Image: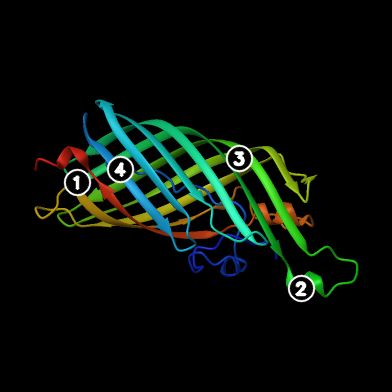
Amino acid sequence: MGRFLCSTAVSGSVMGLLTGCSVYAPLQPAAPFIRQRGDAEATVSAYLSGRVEGSAAYSPLKHVVVRAAGGLKTNGTDSQYYRIRQLEAGIGAYCRLGDDWLLGAMVGYGLGKGGARYYDDFEKALPDSVPLHLYRYSFRKPHVEAYVSHRSRWTTVGASCRFSQVRFANFTDRGQPAPLRQMSRLEPSVFLRLGGAKVLPWLQGQVVLSLSLAAGGRTHSPNKAVYAMKMEPAFTSFGLVIYPHRFKE
């Protein structure tokens, strides 16, 4: 109960989001395949839940990368919904290891706001219960991350891990403040990109698998709002990656 956003849900179906999920839904960790000054990357991704996000990265200087990303989910009904909007920016460094390997690290800062409204059928059977869950929250999120990737002729594979501290400006359930001011998350991910080579060197398809774990272990809070926010969801996204610097190849 109190679980909301699910990577295996049917897109656009709020009822499909009510099993095994969490109110917190982070943007996926960055792992831009930027290898030299002037390289650029743009990514658009979609989740099975209907959430979408995009990012852009660029190297203005040798070994330096800057990145911006955003995401949103707005679909749902007036009686039941999950909504979130997020933005973040970061700066980092990268290092090539030979022709095919890349290491990188970034620091960043993000902000977002969201809400969830739904009924718990189990609670309806309890006497004197209030079946409506209505969460509203806004947050700021400093984070650090590291990533590694390897490129071959047709594929790029890699992994990244982000540590985030989510600081709530407000977090309420039915208008009452929830007893949670901040939480730390560990967010590992792996990705696979397909395509490129000499056919369309500037385009690849992408699949990302990621987790969002409560740092220090999952907390089983008796407060349902806190429990819902501290769940540990898994996510799957599908997208396209464009490399503008390869257009002339």
The reply to whether the C-beta atoms of the residues labelled 4 and 2 are less than 8 Å apart is no
Q: Furthest residue to the front?
A: 78
Question: Residue tagged by mark 2?
Answer: 122
Name which residue type carries label 3.
Answer: Val
State left or right for residue 86 relative to residue 198.
Answer: right
Which residue is drawn at the image coordinates 52% and 48% (left, top)? Answer: 26
State left or right for residue 113 relative to residue 66.
Answer: right
* Circle 4 SS class: strand
Q: Furthest residue to the bottom?
A: 125
Question: Residue tagged by mark 4?
Answer: 42
> Residue 232, percent across and down?
59, 57
> Mark 4 and mark 3: span between their CA atoms?
26 Å
Quadrant including the N terminus: bottom right
> Residue 155, percent across and down?
22, 56
Vertical arrangement, residue 60 with respect to residue 208, above or below: above
Which residue is drawn at the image coordinates 62% and 67% (left, top)? Answer: 18
For marks 4 and 1 on the same chain, the one whose residue lies earlier in the sequence: 4
- Within 10 Å of disc 2 (Cα), the crowding (few <14, some 14-19, many 20+) is few
Question: Residue tagged by mark 1?
Answer: 100
